[in-house]
Structures are given as C-alpha cells and as structure tokens.
Amino acid sequence: MSEKSLKEYLKNITKDNLVKKMKVAGLKYTGLDKTAIVGSLEEFLLNEQSIDKIWNSLSPFEREYLDEFLKYEETPKIEKLKYMYEKHDVKGSYIREIWEGNSKMNLLFIGKVIPLQIKELLKKYLTPIVIKYNALEQLTENDKYRFNIIAESFAEDLCSVINLASSVDLSLTKEKQLPSKSTITKINSVLCNKDFVFNEVVLQEYLSILGVVDTVIYESEGGCSDYDYRPFFKVEYFRVTPLGAFVLGMSKNFSYEEKVTGSGFTVENSFEIKVIDIPSNQVHKLFFEQFAYKEEHQQYCIYKISFTAVVRALDKNITLESIIEYIRSYSLNEIPSELVTAIHKWKKDSDKVVIRNITVLQTENIELMEELQKDHNIIKYMVNDLACAFEIDPNSASKVKREIEKKEYYCKH
C-alpha cells in the first residue's frame, strides 16, 4: 500500500483545524475556501526554506522529540519522555500531544502522523547515531567462555523451521499477508532459543545470525539507556569471524573446512537409518523426514527405508538414485547389500503400473478395429497400442493407486 500524499492528509482535516495551521504558519486565510487553504499549506510545507524556519523555531526539547519520533517511527516511550522532560526542564503531562497548540510542530504533524513528504525534508536535521567500540586484545577471564557463536543452535533452529514449513501448512493473514498467530506459534515451538528475547540491534539480530560476527552478551540490569530501566540482553563484546572479514572486505581470502567429525549416520541391516541428535546431523534428518517413517528416541532418531517410504519419495519426485547416492555419501558404515538390492528392485518395479490421462480410440467391433489399425492414414497418429490397459473411474484414480501399492507395486499417477 503506497503512502498517502501530503495533500491527501490535509484534505481529511476540518477547515477549522486547517485555519489553525494557517495561523501558526503565519499565512493569510481570510476569504479562502478549504481547497485553497489545502493548496496554500501544501505549498508552504513542501518548501525547504519553510521547513528550515520551522526547525529553527523549535525548542531543544521539541527537536529531540522530533529526532526520536522520526528515527523510530513512533511516539517516544514513556521512559524516554520522562527522561526528556527532566533533561530540558519541561513542565506538564507526559501523555499530552506536545505538537498541539501554537507550537510550530503543529505544522509537521497531521493527527499523530508526519506525512512522508515532510519526513524526507526533515531527515537532514536528524542527529547521527554514534556507536563507539574499543578494540580489545583479549577477553577477561570471566568473559572468555561466554561467546554466543552461531554454530551452537543456528543450524538446528534453521533446519527445524525448514522441516516445519515442509510438513505443516503455515498460513498468512488475508489483509496484510503477514504470518498468522497460529503460524508464529508453530515456529516458536520449534526454535531452540524461544525462551530468550534479544534487543533488536544490528550486531545480535543481523550480523550474528548471518555469521559475520560472534558476540558476548549479558543481561543488563539497567536497561538499554539512561531512561529505560527494563533489563534486556546487551552485546558486551563482538569479534568479526573469518567469513565476516571476507564479506566486509577486511580479508581477501576465505576458506571453509567442514567439520565432519561425529556427523553422518549409520545404516542397520533392518533397513534402518540411525541419526544421532547433534546439530551437524540436522540436514540428514531433514532429508529422511521427507519420506521415511521416523522413530524418536532420547538421543537419536531411526528412519525406516521401506517400500512405503520409497513410494512417498517417488511421489515427491525424489529419485531412488538420489537416495542411494545420499546414503553412500554420508553413511558412517558400509551399506548392507540387502538394502541396495531392495532399492534396485523397487526401482525396477516403479515403472510397471501407470495411471495417466490419454485419448483413446475405441470400438467394440473387433473387425473394425483391425481395419482401422491397418489404415496408414490413421495408424500414423497412433502413439501406443495399449494391450495391457483398462479403463477406470477417473474419480477413483487415487484409490486404485493405493490398492496397487498394497501389493507392493509402485503406481505412478
């Protein structure tokens, strides 16, 4: 949805309130109708010199208020307001709308909103956000074991969400197409760090997640600023990872050596894949969960490779060749020959029965059929002479497929 123009905002204001803005701006309004007043205010507020005069007329308190409002796209929180009121020795209620009345701020706000066109003109007045970090050769003894490194749970969390998305219907709201409440609940239920809430800062929420930095965090007792007293998780130290150095141009070389110790799975004689529950094995669990029956145990999972699992894989366009190749690539032990033989047999049987839509030329007269099959002008259009086929109810195709697979013949449909 596109942002409303300044003119659209002004049109929705009553004439009395428009006149009040004209008075604050020092503009002539006598004898003007509403349309003319809207045009006059629009021209005034989109003029850089007008905005400059408005800004220079504001008090230090009003400027800081606008600075906060524009940076965070919302009215400053009550803790911040209390801090600002005390800092600038401003009297009055924290909850009043400070742009009301004769303040020049009245011109910038339409209701509780600053229109986008005015925001763009105000950007140059915003104070820069200054972040200071001091280089540290070595962490203190108490902090050196507290690094929040991406490999600890990110892989498991990511794989869990991917698996959830592939196995459960996740819905969006109709109006804004955002994740619904039930979807958020499902995602939260699979995340490892669901009991922690991090302040949305670049280091912790973005760079750390992308693997650009490692961080040391602690729970702040005094909140995130001079005016916010609520505890939250704060970044105390960070270090740029080798990947981060490469991405940020600090290093020209980057190599990644995959740690395979302990990763992988074992294949049992009973066609069972045993996967130990460690983060590096999450990708293997994701692969087998697409088609194999899963048994959960305390420290490992068992995935059973059976004819039913093969049927499910083929229905998802996962080829038997890719299954064999995957098992060979990551198995920590030798694959039982019985499993390979069984998979090859299932592959051989997979093309035996097919349910498909075709166009059939049909007659109950055998002699007429023979005559038509000898006609070269007709036979050239024949795709296949169907000796081993019979007609079924098209609405029952799925039921027929299941009955065939009960006999351990894979049926394509």
Image (cartoon, grey):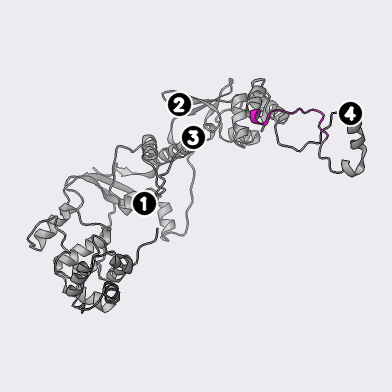
At 49% from the left and 43% from the top, the residue drawn is 258
Camera sees residue 356 = yes
Quick one: label 1 or label 4, which is nearer the N terminus? 1
Between the C-alphas of marks 1 and 2, the distance is 32 Å
Quick one: label 4 or label 3, which is nearer the N terminus? 3
**Image spot of residue 336 (x, y percent):** 62, 24
Determine which of the numbered discs, if any, sits on residue 206 in the image.
Answer: 1
* Magenta stretch in the rendered image: 385-396
Between the C-alphas of marks 1 and 3, the distance is 27 Å
Q: Amino acid at mark 2?
A: Tyr
Q: Amino acid at mark 1?
A: Tyr
Quick one: label 1 or label 3, which is nearer the N terminus? 3
- Image quarter in which the N terminus is found: bottom left
Secondary element under disc 4, as helix, strand or loop, is helix
Left or right for 268, reference 107: right
Q: Is the residue marked by circle 1 packed among few (<14), some (14-19), or many (20+) residues within 10 Å?
A: few
Q: Which image quadrant for residue 371?
A: top right
The answer to whether the residue labelled 1 contacts the one labelled 3, judged by CB atoms less than 8 Å apart, is no
Q: Which residue is mark 3?
A: 167
Query: In terms of depth relative to the viewer, which is nearer, 370 or 119?
Result: 370
**Image spot of residue 26 (x, y percent):** 18, 78
Q: Which residue is mark 4?
A: 366
> From what the image shows, is residue 191 above or below residue 268?
below
At 7% from the left and 62% from the top, the residue drawn is 89
Determine which of the numbered discs, if any, sits on residue 300 in the image.
Answer: 2
